[in-house]
Amino acid sequence: MPAIPVLKVVIVGDGNVGKTSLVRRYCEGMFSASRVATIGVDFQTKQVRLEEIEVKLSIWDMAGQDRFQSVRTGFYKGSRAAAMIYDVTDPVTLGNLARWREELAGVNPMPPLVVIGNKTDLPRAQPPDPARAFAESIGAPYLETSAATGEGVPALFETLARLAFGPAPAHAESQAAPAPSAELGPAGTQAPTPSTELGPAGTQAPGSPTEAAPAGTQAPGSPTEATPAGTQTPGSPTEPGPAGTQAPTARDD
């Protein structure tokens, strides 16, 4: 049985935006309203079934406080994707996502991103349009979640898994038939074009613009017709006579 790929993903955003609650909701199926700040980094794993393969997410939940910035930097290495979380009830946390992106930019290569608006079960401070515009500007998908109700949480981690694993393979399509201008004949040969038709044994088929005649002769209807070997066509200025002689020339009587 092949080993399941392990994909490292990171969860970033300001403190109190619900990063840890999202991870616990997905990995443990639970939600706690009491808030306990993450110290440095938290870590969980979860298997995710994609369309073509099952993968294991190694989920790194980064502390959002500034005092942990030096600690976070070392944990970004090797990440395959990142979710940037903001709180829909606090517009400041959305504005700070640009700073989080700059921090992630220190990772080489830059992991693909997804922008998440969390706490949709609470009254919004603003519509989602600014967040969608920000996500579009950085080429990231935008999703909304609620750790309290579980809404959108599976989609968040399935999106992370897809970004980390890579694009889904395109389904193979049936190969198109060859174009009429280059039709294939038997055994890999090319079919003759209408302007040149082949006859038996390397000759040209009748009716083509130029018809092949027997060896050493000229095809009928050509400007000059070939006669049997060693003879001249009648009416020529000089006609050969018997061997070694010249035919009589015309004279005036």
Image: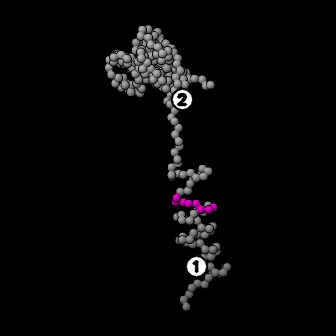
Q: Is residue 170 positioned above or below 83 on the image?
A: below
Residue 79 place in picture, x, y as percent: 50, 20
How dense is the environment of label 2, judged by Cα within 10 Å: few (below 14), some, or many (20 and up)? few
Residue found at x 48% / y 24%: 158
The question of residue 93 being in magenta is answered with: no
Earlier residue among tags 2 and 1: 2
Q: Quadrant of residue 197?
A: bottom right
Q: Are marks 2 and 1 in contact (CB under 8 Å)?
A: no
Residue found at x 55% / y 56%: 192
Instruction: Tell me: 230 left or right of 118.
Output: right
The question of residue 200 being in magenta is answered with: yes
SS class, disc 2: loop
Residue 62 place in picture, x, y as percent: 46, 14
SS class, disc 1: loop
Which quarter shows the N terminus? top right
Question: What's the amino acid at mark 2?
Answer: Glu
Q: Residue furthest bottom?
A: 253
For marks 2 and 1, give the CA distance.
85 Å
How dense is the environment of label 1, judged by Cα within 10 Å: few (below 14), some, or many (20 and up)? few
Q: Quadrant of residue 205?
A: bottom right
Residue found at x 44% / y 13%: 31
Q: Is residue 142 positioned above or below 90 on the image?
A: below
Give the labeled residue for mark 2: 52
Pair 2/1: label in front = 2
Residue 61 place in picture, x, y as percent: 47, 15
Question: What's the amino acid at mark 1?
Answer: Pro
Asked if residue 167 shows in the view, the reply is: yes
Residue 29 place in picture, x, y as percent: 48, 15
Which residues, given as a range, are shown in magenta?
194-201
Give the labeled residue for mark 1: 234
Asked if residue 12 shows in the view, the reply is: no
